[in-house]
Amino acid sequence: MVVNGHGDMTRALIGNLIGEIMVNAGVAGAVVDGAVRDVQALSEMGLAVYARAVTPAGPFKDGPGTIGAPVAVGGVVAVVVAGDVLVGDADGVVVVARHRVQEVVDAVDGIGEKEQALRRRILAARPERAVMA
């Protein structure tokens, strides 16, 4: 799920109650251009949540909002549409357009192999160093 909170960090857009609803709906995670709360509870639910900020202030309960519409967040030009694939780790989030998923998967495999080969060469060239106490 991708939520455009327009970067507002004063109120959480997702907390543990909305997290429970997300889990019930089969949502695996969220990218939120805004704040969230109840981070530990969301994590314990198995939700991967990427947000601009964390705040204890709860969400407003009366909208506005649209579900299923294309959305752009975080000042990124690319628009996320239903069916796109989002992949995230501790370094950030990448959006892959649905029609490019196989192309990207194929490219990632090759990049990983090249990086592993480079890492082996770097480690092989590392000089032996005396252990300093």
Image (tube, rainbow, N blue to C red):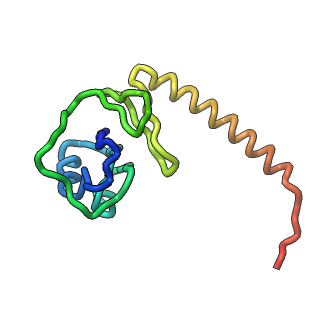
76 sits left or right of 70 in the view: right
**Which residue appears at 22% of the width and 47% of the height?**
22
The mark total stands at 0
Locate residue 114: give its quadrant: top right
Query: Which one is nearer the viewer's eye here, 70 or 98?
Result: 70
Expressed as whole percent of the image width and height from the top left, the position of residue 98 reads 39, 24
Identify the residue at the far bottom of this view: 133
Identify the residue at the far left of this view: 62
117 sits left or right of 102 in the view: right
Query: Which one is nearer the viewer's eye here, 89 or 123?
Result: 89
Height in image: 117 above or below 23? Answer: above
Expressed as whole percent of the image width and height from the top left, the position of residue 64 reads 16, 40
Expressed as whole percent of the image width and height from the top left, the position of residue 4 reads 30, 39
Expressed as whole percent of the image width and height from the top left, the position of residue 121 reads 80, 44
Height in image: 6 above or below 77? Answer: below
**Which residue appears at 18% of the width and 56% of the height?**
17
Query: Which one is nearer the viewer's eye here, 9 or 19?
Result: 9
Quarter of the figure that contains the C terminus: bottom right
Height in image: 12 above or below 108? Answer: below
Locate residue 1: give its quadrant: top left
**Which residue appears at 16% of the width and 52% of the height?**
60
